[in-house]
Amino acid sequence: MGIKKVITKEDWEERLDYVKVRKEDMNRLVMNFLFTEGYVEAAESFRLESWTAPDIDLATIAVLMGVNKAVQSGRVEDAMEKVNDFNPEILDTNPQLFFHLQQQRLIELIRNGKVFEALEFAQKELAPIGEENQSILEELERTVSLLAFEDVTRCPVGELLDVSQRMKTACEVNAAILTSQSHEKGLNLGAFVPGNTDAISEDALETLCWLISPYFFFNSRRTIATLLFITKKIYF
Amino acid sequence: MPTSAPPPSNYPTRSEDLIGRLNSVHIPCEAKLKALRELKNQIIGNRTKKIAFLKLGAVPSLVSILSSAVAENGGNLEFNEPVIIQSAAAIGSFACGLDAGVNAVLDAGAFPLLFGLVSHPNEKIVDACARSLKLIYQSKLAPKYNFLLEKNMDFLLSLLNSKNENVTGLGASIITHSCHTSLEQETLSEAGVIKKLISLLGGSLIQRDASLESLGAIIKENPVVVSKFMGPVNGRALNVVTELTKDRYPQTRLLACMCLILIRNASTCYLQDAGIKTKLILILLELIDDPGQVGDEAPFVLSSLIAEKEDLQKIAFDSNIVDKLCNHLEKGSLQAKSLQGIFLALADLCSKLECCRDRFLSLKAFNFLTDVLTHDSPEVRTAACICLKNISRSVKNLSAGHFMNEVVIVPLVQLLHDTCTSVQIAALGAISNIVVDFTEHKSTFIHCGGVKQLVQLLKSMDPTIRFNAMWALKNLIFLVNSMCKEEILLELSPSILISLICDPETSVQEQALALVRNLVDGAIDSVEYVFSEEGLLLNAIGRQLQSASKVEVLIQGMYVLNNVASGNEFHKEAVMNLLFPHAGSDTQTILIKFMQSTDSRLRTASVWALVNLTLTSSPGANSRVMKLQRAGIVSQLKNMANDPCLDVKLRAKTALGQSMMFVDPSMGKFVFTC
């Protein structure tokens, strides 16, 4: 192990100010960010317009787009089939992800008012998972409680019906697909914002605004430089 | 009157219908392919469905479809290849994480089929088959791969050389699964597999992780292979692995740490400096916090690093590891694996260091420990008992009687009749320490039914259980008060002890004799115990002394005689009769043999007995000394006056001095004859 290097805040900020940010690096950063955060169509458009070579191969991009579209339109079973065609190991070795997708299927059934089918689905498909895995039991109970309310939009767990829940699920699938191809999980801002995916998305969105801002303010340059350092694109 | 069961439904369930479609020879290809995809999508991720379909015989159907498609070989290409892909994927999914599935897949003959397809020109078929085989190899039930056959090694190398990530992953998983003996490790090393795996460390995440695991299997406990790994042929292998301990993915960091630890443990030449020790501990400490599987596995890897190594335990302690692990316990609702890992790590930490035990007890984490003694998982119960055993090594707390209370004892005694042997043995270990309690609370153990259970275990078929139960009883009896002794002896009959003194296992014999030694220690009436049943017990001990060869058995036997000889005249004479059974014969008495033993402990024990036998204040000492003189014992004592061992020397001098009083009256005017 080498000697630990200590850098003061002022020193750090000074170094950041001197970093030259190349456009290609910034483009790639933006594009990867968009892919990994689930803005797949935006990422694909950005890629084509900026002629940036993707770190991710085209087959994976196609799957990402297909899966995302399916989840965002509520066709979860479709999405799962696409994932299984792409790599059957993903759902078989990721019990949390599998549960969240099944949970999303239930939510979609409830959203469409198919109460009996939802009940049957909960009984046949979800209950057994709860038995096998104690840690998801709580989440399962929350989801199933949706069935108890006539007006689901006004129940305590109503946020599950929100489209942001679809987004959350889509992000999770995204990450799993990318990891299976052993691509970087993206900016991994999660490492700096511990907690739920919502917090990551908010923070990341804010950063995105800075990044694509055509006005390179003092602060945003530093942010870009920091992000590039984190993703190991530059070294001090 | 038996009630009639409801008539069976005439309508097949959806699942039965699906299997029906798969088995049907009449349905068109598209429908069959559709059915395959449907089955695959139903079972992936869904353990319950897998089990249900297994019962309906899905696997043999799948294998037969796969084998027909392979046999057709080119025929109906449009459907053949997709059929192969889907059926291979479904077969793999059945094997994923499900032992019953693996068995079904192997029984149905899928294995050779899948292997044959790994070199197929269609990349997607190769992917599907390699993945499925990899999933099978993740189970212990997969058939062992024989690395010693040349063609097998060649095939393995071809897998590792493939450009396909799934195929190299398969090669690595075969190694991780089947490489166990040092011969296999060396064969793989000779064939250049290590070099290949190291190059894969620069590949994708999956390749890196798979290679790290395989490398671990090859270098484990093999100093020869480790030095090859560190040698010039493999380049800067160590640097690569060390870099991976800083990788962004926690799983990679953990596997890299595991490799470094294996290198460290296999060979004392490498990775011994303080820097690497601290680094490994800090990385593992951080990994313990990981929310996923990595967090569950990290404590096990930590255990492999610190077990038996006090210096590492100290470094870990200084990094506040006890607090961290106890914090995890406080979070609650932990999975069994996680709990097992945490308690095993705590057990290692508390194995030698009092500071760790103190810290653990001060954090009030002891409650968690007693709670999990009744956990569902036998592995967790075992880990908790081992942890408890190590914590109870704290003499300070033991003396204060902190462990001898019902909260601890009741569940422990319960565990003595646990269904799982390893739990019983671990519980016995904990009890052995706790009953050494120096306060007067041993009765708590007896009243909780502890002695009954221990005596029951003395009759076990398993020698390890007999051994440990005897150890626990021995410790219980050590310095116990007479009232408790009475209660114990109510359960422990002499006949049980006699059979254990003559147990087929010498280690059990030793413990049995040690128990008797503790039993007859103390008041004079304790000594009477060995004379019960008309002296059968004493005779059994005498017989063992004549016939046993293991020195530890002889030592304990001599100490029993020693304690008996500290009693009254009758007791001393009994000991003499045992040691000199054939009056006037030429057979060398065993005592001389013991006094001439190369083991100083046996010499010490023998001389102690002589000290008691020649005690000048005893009435019969005179005649005893004469007897000893005739048997050549006194001369032997003279030789031992210059014994290299101080204990022997001092006792020999005492015994000699006492003997000389009788042998040579001119030595002194003090001849006691009363």
Image: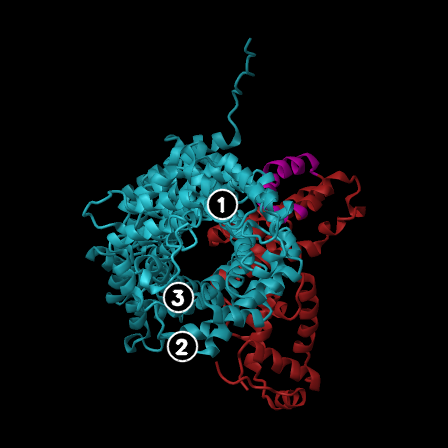
Chain colours: A red, B cyan
Task: Indicate whether residue A137 is drawn in magenta.
Answer: yes
Q: Quadrant of the N terminus of chain B?
A: top right
Coordinates of residue A75 in the picture (x, y in percent):
61, 48
Using residue A195 as the reference point, say whether residue B77 is left or right of it.
Answer: left
How far apart marks 1 and 3 lie (CA) works out to 56 Å
The one of B621 and A106 positioned closer to us in this rendering = B621
Which residue has dot 3 on it? Answer: B262
Q: Badge 1 local density, few (<14 within 10 Å), some, or many (20+)?
A: some
- Residue pushed farthest top? B1
How far apart marks 1 and 2 lie (CA) works out to 69 Å
Name the quadrant containing residue B411: top right
Which residue has dot 1 on it? Answer: B524
Q: Mark 1: which secondary structure?
A: helix
Q: Residue at x 62, y 38 (%)?
A: A121
Coordinates of residue A58 in the picture (x, y in percent):
48, 64
Q: Mark 2: which secondary structure?
A: helix
Q: Residue at x 67, y 70 (%)?
A: A204
Marked residue chain, label 3: B
**Amino acid type, mark 3:** Leu
Answer yes or no: is residue B612 visible: yes
Coordinates of residue B187 in the picture (x, y in percent):
24, 62
What residue range appears in magenta?
A: A114-138
Q: Main secondary structure of the magenta part?
A: helix
The one of B46 and B354 positioned closer to us in this rendering = B354
Which residue has dot 2 on it? Answer: B239
Coordinates of residue B661 in the picture (x, y in percent):
35, 59
**Which sits earlier in the primary sequence, circle 1 or circle 3?**
3
**Amino acid type, mark 1:** Ile
Answer yes or no: is residue B246 visible: no
Q: Is residue B397 above or below residue A32?
A: above
